[in-house]
């Protein structure tokens, strides 16, 4: 049975939200939480949101992107603490930030899992991982491990993680149903995948032809062996949230 037809009993969240920085983050797999200026490549097409395509962009200048990705004004529409509240992250658990970028969510996840927990911060861009590693060192986040991963593989051990958070990144991943299978395999028995991405109507995010409707995300996750649903009521002003379980 699809989770889209069977409620998961998710809590309602009331948020006071505003405006802010710039759009999401592009790549062929996990990279950065927010887009800067968008560049249409030769192969941009109206169906680029299809499962075989991802939105690619150069994120090698991590320091420059940090100015927008880590802008405190982003909190108003990204509502990071509200998203993490929904996820019900257990202390001492292992969680994944897939497409961690410059680490916007990383310190928050670090606090949630505590000293006995682990945060795996994954990205496909070497400069992003380098930037994040320095940020982890500067902030003494001993429970965070930045990792460089391949575009088609998160590189996670089977049954090893409790939560996987994917913010503004799902639309960058190619062959998403196949990728979802690898995420499903990495989850503990009660593990969950949480995807946050831009709505078709949002005034920021990737070019329209690369946006993926929430219902399509649900289908892609279910093709990967997960049960998924769109989180309701909608707690974010410019994005949707999809939750998936084994």
Image: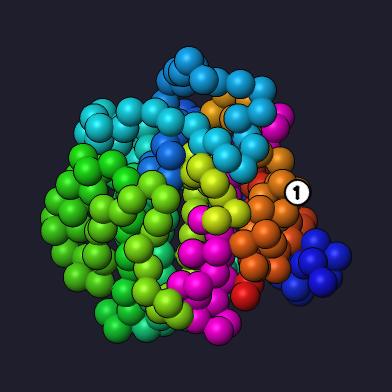
Q: Is residue 161 left or right of residue 48?
A: left
- Residue at 14% of width from left, 55% of height from top? 138
Quarter assignment of residue 94: bottom left
* Colour scheme: rainbow
Which quadrant of the structure image shows residue 197? top right
- Secondary structure beneath dot 1 equals helix
Q: Which residues are magenta?
A: 179-204
Please name the residue shown 51% across and 42% down the image: 174
**Residue pointed to by mark 1:** 215
Name the side, left or right, on which 61 lies relative to 221: left
Asked if residue 143 lies left or right of residue 97, the reply is: left
Total marks placed: 1
Residue 154 spot, x, y in % from top left? 39, 59
Image vertical order of residue 108 relative to residue 32, above or below:
below
The percent position of residue 65, horizontal first and vertical second, equals 31, 32
Q: Nearer the viewer, residue 109 or 229?
A: 229
Residue at the (71%, 29%) spot, across then down: 201
Q: Position of residue 112 (x, y in %)?
A: 41, 72
Q: Nearer the viewer, residue 179 or 231?
A: 179
Q: In the displayed image of the protein, which residue is found farthest to the right?
A: 5
Vertical position of residue 129 compared to residue 4: above or below: above
Q: Does 181 appear above or below 63?
A: below
């Amino acid at each position: 049975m699809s989770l889209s037809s069977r409620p998961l009993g998710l809590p309602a969240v009331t948020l006071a939200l505003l405006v802010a920085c710039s759009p999401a983050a592009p790549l062929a797999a996990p990279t950065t939480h927010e887009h800067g200026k968008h560049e249409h490549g030769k192969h941009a097409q109206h169906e680029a949101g299809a499962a075989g395509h991802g939105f690619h962009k150069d994120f090698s200048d991590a320091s420059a992107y940090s100015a927008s990705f880590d802008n405190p004004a982003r909190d108003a529409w990204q509502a990071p603490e509200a998203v993490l509240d929904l996820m019900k992250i257990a202390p001492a658990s292992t969680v994944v930030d897939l497409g961690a970028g410059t680490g916007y969510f990383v310190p928050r996840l670090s606090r949630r899992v505590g000293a006995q927990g682990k945060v795996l911060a994954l990205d496909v861009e070497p400069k992003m991982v380098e930037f994040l590693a320095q940020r982890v060192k500067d902030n003494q986040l001993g429970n965070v491990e930045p990792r460089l991963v391949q575009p088609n593989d998160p590189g996670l051990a089977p049954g090893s993680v409790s939560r996987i958070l994917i913010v503004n990144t799902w639309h960058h991943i190619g062959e998403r149903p196949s990728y979802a299978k690898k995420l499903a395999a990495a989850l503990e028995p009660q593990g969950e995948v949480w995807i946050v991405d831009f709505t078709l109507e949002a005034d920021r995010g990737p070019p329209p032809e690369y946006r993926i409707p929430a219902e399509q995300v649900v289908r892609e996750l279910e093709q990967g062996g997960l049960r998924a649903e769109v989180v309701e009521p909608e707690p974010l002003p410019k994005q949707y949230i999809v939750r998936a379980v084994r």
